[in-house]
Amino acid sequence: GDKTVIYNQIKFLSRNNDITLLSLVRDEKEALAAPQLRGYCSGIEFFRRGADLSARNLLGAISSADPFTVIRYRQRQMLRRSKELIESGQFDIIHAAFYYMAQYVINKGIVIPQKTAAILDTHNIEYLVYSKCARLQKNPFIRILTTLEAMRIKKYELPLYNKFDACITFSELDRANIIRLSGASNIAVNPACMEASNTGEGSPAAPVKKNSILFFGLLSTPANEDAVRFFYRRIFSKITREVPDARFLIAGKNPRKFAASFSRDPRVSFLGRVADIADTLKGAAVVVAPLRLG
């Protein structure tokens, strides 16, 4: 979801702007995306991320008050390059996606030119996400670690909103929560979107599968994994008591974490990565988004 949003933002903004993109990548495979972006960016620079649980990151988490979610995205070469580009004065706007990338813009080592505006695209209010994760976590050890991380995020994240010239959220609810939590008034709402041509509006309507209930999303993310489990355990069982032939269809990559636990239930089908999500959506009687996180 986050990659889709950023990709489409770059496409839209490139129509009337010159864009220089700095991005972290995990491996060479991710860097192969460069050709798809070159038509939208005048400059692209990739920087290799280390493993999340590297010795450097773990040491940083122990010795620093910064959240681990910030430390694991810290890359020294990218910090130096970001500082160099920002201080060159050649940019009207610096756009950071996610609070943990704010360190490449709002940093005591970086002097932002007076004519340059700094914008934070929040995507999530991370403090609220981690607080909710902690409350839903059954493992007491993980719950304690998640709670401690939420406390660190709160201390780091909330002051950030006032340090940027403007901040962007996806919803009015997020905007209201940021104002309530931080007192910032520089918040605008810009809903996540895609080009209409990507939705397959012109294709013939697929036959609707009777009593089919569809969830779609990247299944390896905690929010989506929790949503599927929550829906199956707490809601789907109630539906099937009233509608015995109801079917739960799950579309998305990486279902390995929990596919085995549902494999014996013939009412559940994993569709995997579908060729056209538009056709899959049209073929469902009902689409659900039972998200409790994010």
Image (tube, rainbow, N blue to C red):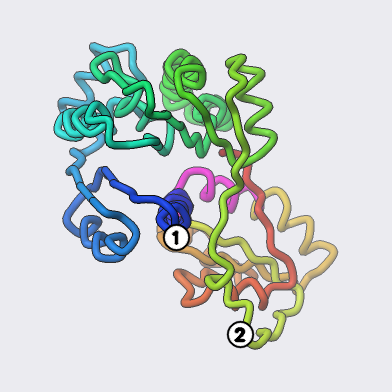
Residue type, label 1 = Pro
Tell me if residue 198 comes above or below residue 227 in the rendering. Answer: below
Q: Return the x and y of residue 200 as percentages of the image width and height.
A: 58, 77
Task: Return the residue nearer the eye: 254 or 289.
Answer: 289
Q: Main secondary structure of the magenta part?
A: helix
Does 279 lie within the magenta span? no
Q: Tell me which segment is drawn in magenta.
A: 219-231
Of circles 2 and 1, the one toward us is 2
Q: How crowded is the residue under tag 2: few (<14 C-alpha within 10 Å), some, or many (20+)?
A: few
Describe the element under mark 2 as helix, strand or loop. Answer: loop
Residue 278, horizontal then vertical, whole percent: 59, 73
Give the residue number, with chain letter if any, for mark 2. Answer: 203
In the image, residue 237 sits, relative to residue 113, either above or below, namely: below
Q: Residues within 10 Å of mark 1 (few under 14, many from 20)?
A: some
Q: Amino acid at mark 2?
A: Ser
Query: Where 268 sits versus 25, above or below?
Result: below
Tag of residue 255: 1
Mark with earlier residue (2, 1): 2
